Image (cartoon, rainbow, N blue to C red):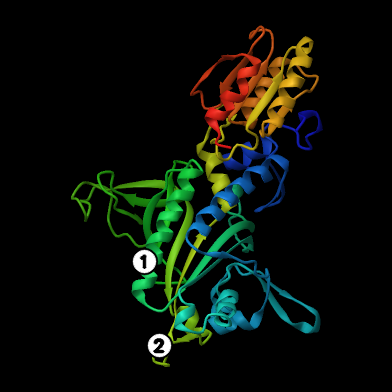
């Protein structure tokens, strides 16, 4: 991609109507554009990052044996009344259609997926079953001021599993838990498992929280063991002994990036979903649900992976494999050839071919935060200067050695 043709442009000043760091940086660097509070357009750079997150999630969900589907976002009132959530979920977007019919935009999809799977998995032979989707969700969020971390429209991956026994549900639940840790690690985040209230869905749940001072959630943690609870259910005070190891607990801030619930029969009972066992008797189907927000992950990474200069994307999420910067117009021929050679080798590059000063280009590159910068200019002489945006390495390489440099960083 030639940067001179890139739709988005960087901003020197922070947007005045943003307060969260992720929204400020992603807007300034040209990844997103705000339409209104809690609603963003993903520009070419931002969509590349979001799609990489989704692909990582798909790989881990597929490895669990879950099958991807896509359910409607527009849903009828009747299914929400049946579950009891038409009046319980206060952030549900409700609207009127023709014939004075009532609808809701999908805030979650238990009401849709339960009767859907019921049609196809009615026997013990069909269980367990697991389906997932990646789709935009809609919630009338009253505090939509945290950029991608708290939106009114946002990307969500929701996985639903259906089981004939608690043992089977627990086994899948543990596997899903590990899959979630895999997702966060691959996205460059260190997540912590936190016990939490299940809200309207279940009595208890597990959240995946990333510790950071910019987080919206407060959690009680022990630094000596894995004890962690959301303050909504935790009665412990700072400094009191940890119930697991006896060390003092602390109150820290965090960003929630995922949650999982054992729904048991909450929704299967509401929709009369039972299975026929080996003896021909009808038995209750048990259910679990597992949510990850791809857009929320993107916001969390932007909050954590940055410095005073701008964003620092992890290698797995960087919108392009490298950012090629031409700082010396007399070397345009060499830079053009390197660009073509790297594309031919299977790498995606953002090539800054603009007629701007070297300082302007370097500042833009740091703000955008692509993993590797390849600089063709006076300082490198007949070589290419390379810099890793996270400052892990820098140096010079011959033009014909740049492919090997990228091969070490990325597995094709």
Q: Residues within 10 Å of mark 1 (few under 14, many from 20)?
A: few
Q: Name the residue under label 1.
A: 171
Q: Is residue 39 left or right of residue 273?
A: right
Mark 1 or mark 2: name the one nearer the start of the chain: 1
Give the residue drawn at x 33%, y 51%: 220
Figure check: 402 above or below 98: above
Is residue 17 something one can see in this rendering?
no
Q: Residue at x 63, y 69 (%)?
A: 106
Quarter where residue 298 is shown: top right
Q: Which residue is drawn at 49% across and 57% down?
A: 63
Where is residue 320 shown, x and y percent of the image?
A: 65, 34
Q: Which residue lies furthest to the left in this view?
A: 246
From what the image shows, is residue 393 above or below residue 168?
above
Q: From the image, state whether disc 1 or disc 2 is nearer to you.
A: 2
- For the point 77% across and 21% down, the residue is 336
**Image side of residue 312 versus residue 14, left or right:** left
Which residue corresponds to mark 2? Answer: 278
| Label ID, residue 282 | none
């Amino acid at each position: 991609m030639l940067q001179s043709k890139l739709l988005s442009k960087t901003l020197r000043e922070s947007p005045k109507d943003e307060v969260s760091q992720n929204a400020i940086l992603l807007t300034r660097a040209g990844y997103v554009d705000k339409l209104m509070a809690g609603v963003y357009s993903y520009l070419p750079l931002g969509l590349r990052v979001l799609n990489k997150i989704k692909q990582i999630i798909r790989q881990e969900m597929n490895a669990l044996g879950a099958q991807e589907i896509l359910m409607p976002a527009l849903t009828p009132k009747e299914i929400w009344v049946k579950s009891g959530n038409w009046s319980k979920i206060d952030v549900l977007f409700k609207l009127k259609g023709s014939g004075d019919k009532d609808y809701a935009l999908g805030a979650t999809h238990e009401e849709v997926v339960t009767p859907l799977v019921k049609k196809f998995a009615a026997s013990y032979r069909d269980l367990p079953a697991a389906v997932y989707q990646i789709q935009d969700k809609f919630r009338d969020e009253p505090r939509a001021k945290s950029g991608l971390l708290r939106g009114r429209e946002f990307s969500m991956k929701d996985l639903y599993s259906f089981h004939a026994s608690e043992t089977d549900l627990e086994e899948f639940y543990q596997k899903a838990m590990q899959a979630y840790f895999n997702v966060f690690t691959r996205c460059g985040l260190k997540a912590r498992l936190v016990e939490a209230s299940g809200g309207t869905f279940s009595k208890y749940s597990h959240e995946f929280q990333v510790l950071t001072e910019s987080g919206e959630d407060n959690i009680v943690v022990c630094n000596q063991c894995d004890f962690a609870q959301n303050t909504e259910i935790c009665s412990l005070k700072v400094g009191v002994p940890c119930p697991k190891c006896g060390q003092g607990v602390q109150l820290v801030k965090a960003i929630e990036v995922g949650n999982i619930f054992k729904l048991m029969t909450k929704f299967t009972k509401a929709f009369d979903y039972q299975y026929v066992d080996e003896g021909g008797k009808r038995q209750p189907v048990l259910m679990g649900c597992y949510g990850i927000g791809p857009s929320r992950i993107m916001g969390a990474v932007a909050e954590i992976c940055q410095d005073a200069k701008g964003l620092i994307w992890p290698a797995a999420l960087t919108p392009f494999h490298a950012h090629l910067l031409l700082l010396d117009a007399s070397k345009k021929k060499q830079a053009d050839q390197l660009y073509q050679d790297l594309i031919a080798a299977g790498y995606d590059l953002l090539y800054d071919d603009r007629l701007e000063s070297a300082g302007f280009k370097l500042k833009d590159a740091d703000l955008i935060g692509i993993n590797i910068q390849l600089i063709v200019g006076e300082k490198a002489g007949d070589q290419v200067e390379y810099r890793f945006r996270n400052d892990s390495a820098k140096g010079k390489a011959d033009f014909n050695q740049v492919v090997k440099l990228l091969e070490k960083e990325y597995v094709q």
